[in-house]
């Protein structure tokens, strides 16, 4: 049953058409990812579905009495409520029931209390306070008494996320829910959304998150909607098949159009029914023949400047804010071709570290030594600070009238914009009219056109569409300079970097060789090893109930021999998979498959070792 039904939806702004005659359904229980290029109207479509904007044509039907929860891309919280009160009061049904119950209790109204009791149970009101505290804790809030109006944009986003989740909506609409979230929080949110029974529609650039939460892809492409049942990888495969088929149909239509056009020219005065039918058919063929397959991609043709052997050297760097230590006598020599990601919880100092190495912030102690050839390109999380009345082409012209792209070749600002999928009709558009993703793409252009050989990128994936991300990943993977990134996008990190700085807090930084998925696997292995060791210790410390020892039976002796052989085999298999996981040669899908397999092996080993200990205890 469709919870959302859209018919003939058309929306445009001036001469920019976002979609035309859009038709699609979203069924109850589906978890849908909305996919489109930046500027194609994803956020606009969400606004139309929510009734915050009106289309030029078409109808939107949403199931009556449907409770909708909506997380904006950049929510504003302006009141004086504390974090706790803002979240607690978000579920109006629960708050109303509590107020009614409190009033009835104060008046000793037993009849009303009895009537309310069932509703309180149905809405799980008795556990509501615990649920609020648990959710705020999971979202990284320790001091929930702070007023919401003083929070950062990222903190406001997390408060807004808690509010929509606590409302138990029938339809949950999320616009970039993973922006500003810690990696651990994203993984918790994946599990939370996966367990919800509601219908979900979301926009996200996080492909791991998308694959693990959504079972349907809804794409806006060439003004139309295309729906795919399956994950993101399946969608890419089917989209390619659709584009190949469409290209074939367009080629056939063009050939047929030439034949029909020749016939029409020869018989301009034809009046018969057959002739009229053929002329009408020609119109349909002409429409098909003039279609365009939307497979344009950004061309990042710029190459970085030559980088010498000496890059950036950090010597005994320390930095603290009051009692919070970020860095403590930290030294490191960055290398040419190094690809590094910095991970850690919000507030641990990741952005501070980037500001220090880019000389945006002075350390308390220590010094930084730059190589003579170093050209830094620093992409800040907050994005490009532009006056909204500046035109798109002026942003590029204000930096340079000629852009070098390597091999002694230069292009004009207009050509540069076109290569980044800003068509001519957008060049004199004001920046204020660009989508969030288009502004970020323009900002990235201003960084790369300066030909940096050291790229420092703070959350570069925020607001960029999935198609741009794929091109950026390939560019960074082949980039001959040094790349240092902070990103919550695990897929992006896995594809680009070869090692991590893990910020543990209190100035402790660990250097891990490998990508994020490999790091999480190692963390899980270490955690499970500790659990096994704890169980072994507990097992050994338990005194036998009876001191009478009977030894092993013949069957148990054979079982002991078999278990020892099994343990040896499982240990070898575990070691083999660990070596593969750390090799850096596996694809993302293979990494996920091997990580699941090693988890099963560890569980089997744990069970075998515990049984071995039981038999040994009995045998001694």
Image (tube, rainbow, N blue to C red):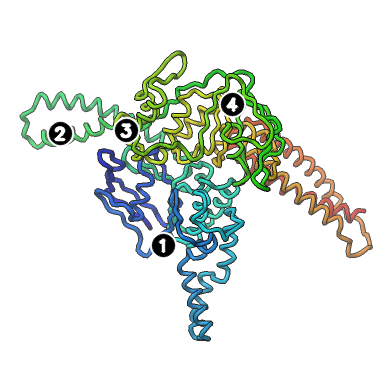
In the image, residue 588 sits, relative to residue 101, either above or below, namely above
Alpha-carbon span between mark 3 and mark 1: 39 Å
Q: Picture coordinates of residue 241 (x, y %)?
A: 40, 34
Alpha-carbon span between mark 2 and mark 3: 39 Å
| Residue matched to label 1 | 67
* Front-most of residues 371 and 142: 371
| Residue matched to label 3 | 426
How packed mark 2 is, by other alpha carbons closer than 10 Å (few <14, some 14-19, many 20 or more), is some
Disc number lying in front (2 or 3): 3
Q: Picture coordinates of residue 29 (x, y %)?
A: 45, 56
* Number of marks in picture: 4
Alpha-carbon span between mark 2 and mark 4: 62 Å
Disc number lying in front (3 or 1): 3
- Image quarter in which the N terminus is found: bottom left
How packed mark 1 is, by other alpha carbons closer than 10 Å (few <14, some 14-19, many 20 or more), is few
Residue at (87, 57) in percent of width and height? 541
Q: What's the mark number on residue 482?
A: 4
In the image, residue 344 sits, relative to residue 471, either above or below, namely below
The secondary structure type at the circle numbered 1 is loop
The secondary structure type at the circle numbered 3 is helix
| Residue matched to label 2 | 278
């Amino acid at each position: 049953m469709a919870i959302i039904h859209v018919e003939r939806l058309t929306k445009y702004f001036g001469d920019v058409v976002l979609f035309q005659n859009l038709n699609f359904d979203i069924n109850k229980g589906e978890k849908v990812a909305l996919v489109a290029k930046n500027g194609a109207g994803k956020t606009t479509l969400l606004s139309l579905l929510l009734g915050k904007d009106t289309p030029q044509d078409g109808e939107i039907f949403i199931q009556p009495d449907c409770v909708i929860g909506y997380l904006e891309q950049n929510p504003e919280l302006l009141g004086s409520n504390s974090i706790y009160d803002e979240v607690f009061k978000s579920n109006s049904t629960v708050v109303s029931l509590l107020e009614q119950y409190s009033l009835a209790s104060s008046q000793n109204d037993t009849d009303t209390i009895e009537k309310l009791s069932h509703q309180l149970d149905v809405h799980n009101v008795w556990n509501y306070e615990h649920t609020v505290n648990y959710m705020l804790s999971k979202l990284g809030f320790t001091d929930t008494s702070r007023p919401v109006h003083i929070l950062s944009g990222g903190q406001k986003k997390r408060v807004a996320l808690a509010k929509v989740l606590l409302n138990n909506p029938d339809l949950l609409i999320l616009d970039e829910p993973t922006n500003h979230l810690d990696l651990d929080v994203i993984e918790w949110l994946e599990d939370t959304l996966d367990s919800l029974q509601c219908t979900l529609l979301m926009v996200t650039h996080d492909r791991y998150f998308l694959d693990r939460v959504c079972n349907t892809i809804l794409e806006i492409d060439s003004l139309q909607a295309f729906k795919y049942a399956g994950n993101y990888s399946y969608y890419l495969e089917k989209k390619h098949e659709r584009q190949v088929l469409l290209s074939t149909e367009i080629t056939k239509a063009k050939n047929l159009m030439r034949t029909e056009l020749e016939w029409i020219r020869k018989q301009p005065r034809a009046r018969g029914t057959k002739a009229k039918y053929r002329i009408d058919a020609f119109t349909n063929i002409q429409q098909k023949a003039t279609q365009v397959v939307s497979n344009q991609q950004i061309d990042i043709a710029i190459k970085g400047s030559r980088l010498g052997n000496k890059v950036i050297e950090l010597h005994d760097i320390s930095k603290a804010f009051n009692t919070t230590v970020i860095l403590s006598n930290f030294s490191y020599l960055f290398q040419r071709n190094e690809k590094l990601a910095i991970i850690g919880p919000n507030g641990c100092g990741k952005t501070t570290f980037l500001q220090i190495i880019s000389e945006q912030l002075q350390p308390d102690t220590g010094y930084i030594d730059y190589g003579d050839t170093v050209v830094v390109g620093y992409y800040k999380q907050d994005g490009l600070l532009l006056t909204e009345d500046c035109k798109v082409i002026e942003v590029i012209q204000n930096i340079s009238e000629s852009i070098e792209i390597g091999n002694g070749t230069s292009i004009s600002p207009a050509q540069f914009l076109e290569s980044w999928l800003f068509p001519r009709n957008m060049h004199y558009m004001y920046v204020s009219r660009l989508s969030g993703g288009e502004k970020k793409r323009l900002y990235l252009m201003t960084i790369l056109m300066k030909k940096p050989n050291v790229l420092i990128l703070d959350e570069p994936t925020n607001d960029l569409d999935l198609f741009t991300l794929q091109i950026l990943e390939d560019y960074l993977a082949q980039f001959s300079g040094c790349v240092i990134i902070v990103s919550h996008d695990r897929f992006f990190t896995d594809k680009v970097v070869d090692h991590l700085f893990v910020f543990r807090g209190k100035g402790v930084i660990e250097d891990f060789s490998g990508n994020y998925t490999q790091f999480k696997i190692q963390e899980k292995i270490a955690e499970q090893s500790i659990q096994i060791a704890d169980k072994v210790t507990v097992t050994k410390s338990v005194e036998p109930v009876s001191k009478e020892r009977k030894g092993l039976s013949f069957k148990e002796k054979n079982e002991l021999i078999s278990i020892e052989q099994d343990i040896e085999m499982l240990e070898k298999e575990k070691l083999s998979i660990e070596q593969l996981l750390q090799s850096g040669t596996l694809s993302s899908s293979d990494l996920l498959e091997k990580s699941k397999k090693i988890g099963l092996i560890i569980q089997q080993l744990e069970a075998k070792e515990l049984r071995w200990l039981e038999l040994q205890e009995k045998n001694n």
